[in-house]
């Protein structure tokens, strides 16, 4: 409980799953007033609201919101939105659920952000902690609201944090934190500026004891390396947390000492080797034994829809990477699989492009990627990459069937769309499940 909330007038904007959890938390306090706002006329979760809660639908009015002591906004509400900037200037405290959580959570917290890989690292970190027999709770952007996991019994929280969540966070004190990578995404929110996007993510280091950075991506570095108990990096060379390659395999290393042969991992691709290294660095920062780390690395099977090996059929591997909703994520999947499949990759891509530049994919065509079957609303932008290697299909299913006919021994068929899914699917999970179901029927 947070006694400082008692007697306050609080507004909650946005009926998403995280704010439903926030509302339940706020109602445990002796508030002067609680009002829920949503700009949608038929928002989700209205049936989950407690009876009698004041709900107001329609456009926001800054003059109304200025009368509240605190406004809690969902991650989907931009702090740059006109009404929000007005109330901030008027002195209203604007926070999100992570900020409220940070003010009352008693156990140490690990924070993980980045454009790609954060769900995998969060889940692997949670598994490592569980193996170490610590009571762990994971949540935030991974889909579990933080107020659903708040408990005095928890020994360690592991939070996946988006840039949107970090925008409204100032009290979060982390035992360890990392930015895994920063690549083009959500630039419509950040005025087209990568630096502004990176700055939002760097808020993770504001009260962080142990910082873990990607030494191959300077945008993951805090503005200063001073003030941390430890400051370490991971990367694909053999330094600090790194990789050592020989003629047969690759090893995860710490300070040039071999820890694990990557062939023992059950997650695929070079990008997942980096995820494993980041996780080891975070685990070391909070005292999780190397023995527990290695056990977890050997047994963690990864997450659905994230470079997931679905099936091998006629010596062709089919991978579901539906979570790749941006170009950088698709690049990571291709780079991660190219050494496993030297006979080249057939790519399935397309959907809602979110205004992205698809040209970074061009370098793979005719090299690591022998064909791209392009579907979805913005497929034309992908087709423009190449007349020779990019092919027009109406649906993902049509693309998969053509890839099945084309694929030869040793190749991979990779669903890594580089786009959002909402033109033809309910979400990336739905898109991935449809792909898995279609692959399971191939060859019947």
Image (cartoon, rainbow, N blue to C red):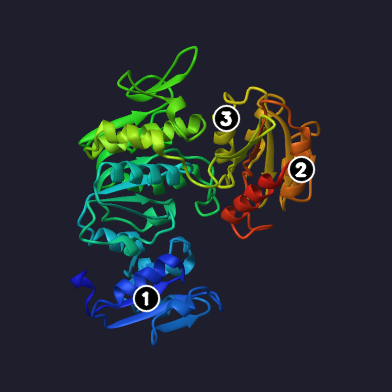
Indicate which disc, 2 or 1, sits on the residue closer to the N terminus: 1
Which of the image's four quarters has the C terminus? top right
Residue 309, by quadrant, is top right
Mark 2 vs mark 3: in front: 2
In the rendered image, residue 19, in percent from the top left (x then y), is placed at 40, 69
In the rendered image, residue 128, in percent from the top left (x then y), is placed at 32, 41
Q: Which residue is mark 1?
A: 11
> In the picture shown, does residue 98 fall above or below 62?
above
Are discs 2 and 3 less than 8 Å apart at CB?
no
Mark 1 vs mark 3: in front: 3
At 39% across and 28% down in the image, what residue appears?
215
Please give the label number shown on residue 401: 2
Q: Secondary structure at mark 2?
A: helix
Q: Secondary structure at mark 1?
A: strand
At 48% across and 66% down in the image, what residue appears?
82
Q: CA distance from mark 2 to mark 3?
A: 21 Å
Q: Residues within 10 Å of mark 2 (few under 14, many from 20)?
A: few
Please give the label number shown on residue 337: 3
Residue 361, by quadrant, is top right
Q: Is residue 371 visible?
A: yes
In the rendered image, residue 334, in percent from the top left (x then y), is placed at 59, 32
Q: Is residue 221 visible?
A: no
Mark 2 vs mark 1: in front: 2
Q: Secondary structure at mark 3?
A: helix
């Amino acid at each position: 409980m947070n006694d400082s909330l008692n007697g306050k007038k609080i507004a909650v904007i946005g009926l998403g799953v995280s704010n439903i959890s926030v509302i339940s938390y706020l109602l445990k306090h002796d508030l002067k007033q609680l009002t829920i706002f949503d700009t949608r006329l038929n928002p989700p979760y209205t049936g989950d609201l407690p009876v009698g809660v004041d709900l107001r639908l329609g456009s926001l009015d800054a003059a109304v919101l200025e009368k509240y002591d605190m406004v809690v906004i969902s991650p989907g509400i931009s702090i740059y939105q006109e009404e929000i900037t007005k109330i901030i200037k008027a002195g209203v405290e604007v926070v999100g659920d992570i900020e409220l959580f940070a003010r009352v959570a008693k156990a140490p917290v690990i924070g993980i952000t980045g454009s790609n890989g954060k769900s995998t690292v969060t889940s692997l970190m949670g598994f490592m902690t569980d193996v170490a027999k610590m009571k762990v709770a994971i949540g935030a952007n991974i889909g579990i609201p933080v107020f659903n996991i708040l408990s005095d019994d928890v020994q360690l929280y592991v939070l996946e944090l988006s840039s949107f969540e970090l925008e409204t966070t100032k009290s979060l004190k982390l035992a360890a934190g990392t930015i895994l990578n920063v690549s083009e995404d959500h630039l419509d929110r950040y005025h087209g500026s990568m630096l502004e996007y990176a700055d939002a993510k760097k808020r993770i280091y504001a009260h962080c004891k142990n910082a873990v950075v990607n030494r191959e991506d300077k945008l993951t570095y805090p503005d200063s390396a001073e003030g941390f108990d430890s400051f370490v990096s991971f990367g694909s060379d053999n330094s600090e947390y790194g990789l050592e390659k020989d003629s047969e395999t690759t090893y995860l290393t710490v300070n040039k000492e071999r820890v694990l042969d990557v062939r023992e991992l059950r997650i695929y691709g070079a990008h997942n080797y980096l995820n494993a290294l980041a996780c080891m660095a975070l685990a070391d920062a909070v005292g999780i034994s190397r023995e527990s780390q290695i056990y977890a690395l050997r047994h963690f099977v990864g997450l659905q829809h994230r470079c997931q090996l679905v099936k091998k059929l006629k010596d062709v591997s089919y991978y579901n990477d539906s979570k790749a909703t941006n170009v950088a994520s698709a690049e990571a999947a291709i780079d991660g699989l190219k050494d496993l499949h030297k006979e080249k990759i057939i790519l399935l891509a397309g959907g809602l492009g979110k205004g992205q530049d698809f040209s970074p994919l061009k370098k793979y065509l005719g090299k690591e990627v022998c064909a791209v079957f392009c579907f979805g609303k913005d497929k034309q932008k992908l087709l423009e990459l190449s007349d020779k290697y990019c092919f027009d299909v109406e649906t993902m299913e049509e693309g998969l069937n053509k890839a099945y006919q084309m694929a030869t021994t040793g190749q991979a068929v990779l669903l890594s769309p580089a786009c959002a899914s909402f033109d033809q699917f309910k979400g990336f999970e739905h898109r991935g499940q449809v792909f898995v179901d279609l692959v399971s029927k191939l060859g019947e």
